[in-house]
Amino acid sequence: MKKTMVSMVLCAAMVAGVLSGCGLKSPDEPTTAAASTAAATEAAAEGAAETEAAGSESSGKYDTASMPEVTLVYAEVNPLDTIVGQIATDFKTKVEELSDGKMKIDVQASGVLGSENDVLDTMLGGGGTIDISRISAFALTSYGGQKSMLLSLPYTFVSREHFWNFANSDLAQEFLMESQENGSGVRGLFYGEEGFRHFFTVNEISDINSLKGMKLRVSNDPVMNGLVEGLGASPTVVSFGELYSALQTGVVDGAEQPIANYKSNAFPEVAPYLILDGHTLGAVQVIITDASWDKLTEDQQAILMEAGAYASSENQKNSGDKEAAVLEELKADGVHVIEVDDVTPWQEATAKVIEDNTKGYEDLYQQLLDLQ
């Protein structure tokens, strides 16, 4: 418990440092966002320390008696039984626990609020119907997320440990700042990951050469387009909600997803060949709109950050085991799992997309690589 709480304090402080360093400010109130974030950081850290000292998760550390009730809508494109679905559940549970039920997190999972791009369009457009969302790093690419793009370049992270070395480092703050620095109107709360991403296909494959000429589903971003082109395949844009039918009807020959998402969305039914190329570790972050953040009290902001630290820590501890368990279930269900013993041909095939998308950020990208 002690180790967990120390981790929570450190993570909360790191995230809050990001938020205070780059929150959007109105012209007539230039310090409000930074001041409220700093206060929330201090409250979250003190609250975590009090919890450790009391030896329980509820010790009156926040003023919940006078706390206004609020419900925040949280969008998740995948089902709750995925790794990222568990992030949402852990975050919701901790927020509601710390606030004595005064804060509710309404998790809308399985893509009922649309694809990641649909959700981002709603949040950035100021629609006010979605407050929080878990998004993939590469989803920010189309919204000016040049630094976030680096996280999704193929073969950047050689292991989960490598990713968490980044996520728990000072460098992570610079990446979480980006969405505020470019004036998008959202702020990052914390990082997580959904496992390594792999290709899966309708027809039998054996190695990298099998993908040549295939139509592979991509989201519309330059990294995935370049990755698929480097493999000699044809990138085909299909929305996530239509992917199952696209595989079933032959619109595409394959796609790529983390293992847990592949299973939970029933893709093995129509694409039972899974090649473990591990081209990208699915880096994710949970974001909140500035409008939603600004309507919260300092205690409520601190609760979100403490809950985010907890959800991130749980994700770090559990994602690897969950992914391994799902892979064994897939094998037992008859999915054809193709191991990749040597990723060198894959790295060589995707070298151009790395070069093209690190221009101007070479030093920053090298810092990422050095964290392994």
Image: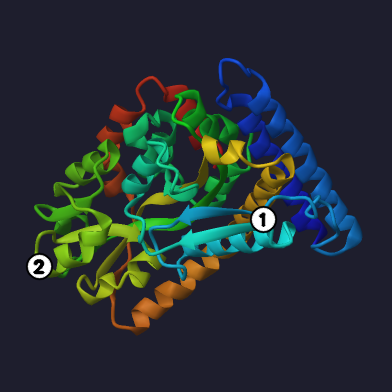
Cα separation between marks 1 and 2: 42 Å
Q: How many marks?
A: 2
Image side of residue 152 versus residue 222, left or right = right
What residue sits right under mark 1 in the picture? 310
Query: Given the image, on which type of amino acid does mark 2 rest?
Result: Thr
Quadrant including the N terminus? bottom right
The answer to whether 156 is drawn above or below residue 61 in the figure is above
> How far from the left and from the top, in percent, is residue 277?
32, 57
At horizontal 21% and vertical 46% (from top left) the residue drawn is 228
At horizontal 26% and vertical 60% (from top left) the residue drawn is 241
The answer to whether 323 is drawn above or below residue 122 in the figure is below
At horizontal 40% and vertical 79% (from top left) the residue drawn is 329
Q: Name which of mark 1 and mark 2 comes first in the sequence.
A: 2
- The answer to whether the residue labelled 1 contacts the one labelled 2, judged by CB atoms less than 8 Å apart, is no
Image side of residue 266 versus residue 364, left or right = left
Residue 251 figure quarter: bottom left
Within 10 Å of disc 1 (Cα), the crowding (few <14, some 14-19, many 20+) is: many
Secondary structure of the residue carrying tag 1 is: helix
Label disc, if present, on residue 249 of the rendered structure: 2
